[in-house]
Amino acid sequence: MTRQQVLDLYFLDARHKLVEIAAFLDRVERAEGQDDFRLKNFRAALASLTGRKQHRAKRVLLAFSDPTTKPVAKAGGKGACGAWNPAP
Amino acid sequence: MKYIEPHAHMVSRVTDDYERMAVAGCQAVCEPAFWAGFDRSGPAGFYDYFSQLTEHEPRRAAKFGLKHFCWLCINSKEAEDVKLAEEVISLVPQFLDRPNVLGIGEIGLNKNSRNELRVFELQVELAARYNQLILVHTPHLEDKLKGTRLILDALKSDRRIRPERVIIDHVEEHTVEMVLDAGMWAGMTLYPETKCTPARAIDILETYGRERLWLNSACDWGISDPLAVPKTALEMKKRGHHAALVEKVIFDNPRKFLSQSKNFKRAF
């Protein structure tokens, strides 16, 4: 596809998602209380979008990922929350 | 268009889904063993589940002209209890000769714990001993990167495991390259919120090539779409991909990998 075709097919969807992210950040900051590790990871992921470098999706996923390499002693539950907590 | 659904948990779906998949062009559905959404109370629950996968589901699918295949294992979400896992693993060999069994799966990791890794290695050992194909589940979200690395390290350290007989499922942009570089197959799962969207899956195809990659819905008891594969095929056509390439990704590629199973080859 040409760049124009990509824009024709995906621009409105991407615009919609960007507005949703902006509204989410406004909503979080409007609410009382403290941030947690998820928002810190989220802001780091957002920072990886700037500039003209490729592989943005990969960098966003890496920003949320557990970077350690050893198995944990015991599974602390079954679910995942979407962001790595360095101090659980 | 014809396609193969290589990963769907049909025990959790209504019969209407079989009909919709058949109407959409599905030729075969493959069902890995997985977590029921709750922990089973003991090995007998797994015996019944394996019977359901090898006896009941093929009959339900056949009503719509669909071939049904399955993979057997204990999943990683119930692998923290090693004693239970060992008992369940001991049940598996008696089912391996059943005509719709493809191999051992979906084994893997969930929270990347020592016990999960131990149970993963026990099931790799089972696959090696019985010369079975392997389907691997990689962890969700923040645990995927680390889990994929641990899984690849474990598989590469066992010289009996031939990489072309292993599919590593649920890859995303940060894990697909390491899987393909290891010589294994990679599955992209089209699942809302936590895995790939159709657009991102096609991006991965366009970036990393069309070989050793397949698409699946992994539809289950959660919010998920049993028609995610044909919908992604439609998205590929919107992007201008030729029909032959679409068919390669949604039919030829899974058929090529799965035909390493004598049961699959016999049926196709």
Image (tube, coloured by chain):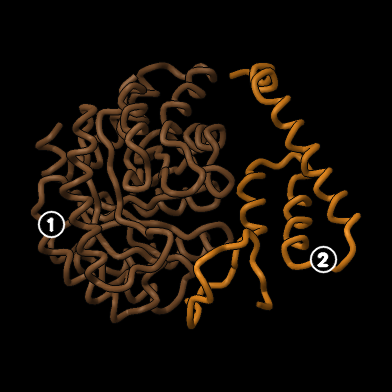
Q: Position of residue A65 (x, y in %)?
A: 61, 61
Q: Mark 2 points at which residue?
A: A35
Residue B6 falls in which quadrant of the image? top left
Q: Position of residue B224 (x, y in %)?
A: 48, 41
Q: Compared to B99, does A80 lie above or below?
A: below
Question: Which residue is at the front of the view, B71 or B236?
Answer: B71
Q: Mark 1 points at which residue?
A: B96
* Residue at the (43%, 35%) spot, across then down: B209
Q: Where is residue B249 in the image (x, y as percent from the top left)?
A: 37, 30
Chain for numbered disc 2:
A
Helix, strand or loop for disc 2: loop
Quarter containing the C terminus of chain B: top left
Residue B261 falls in which quadrant of the image? top left
Residue type pointed to by label 2: Asp
Q: On the picture, is A2 further left or further right than B224? A: right
Helix, strand or loop for disc 1: loop
Q: Compared to A47, does B241 lie above or below?
A: above
Quarter containing the N terminus of chain B: top left
Chain A is which colour?
orange
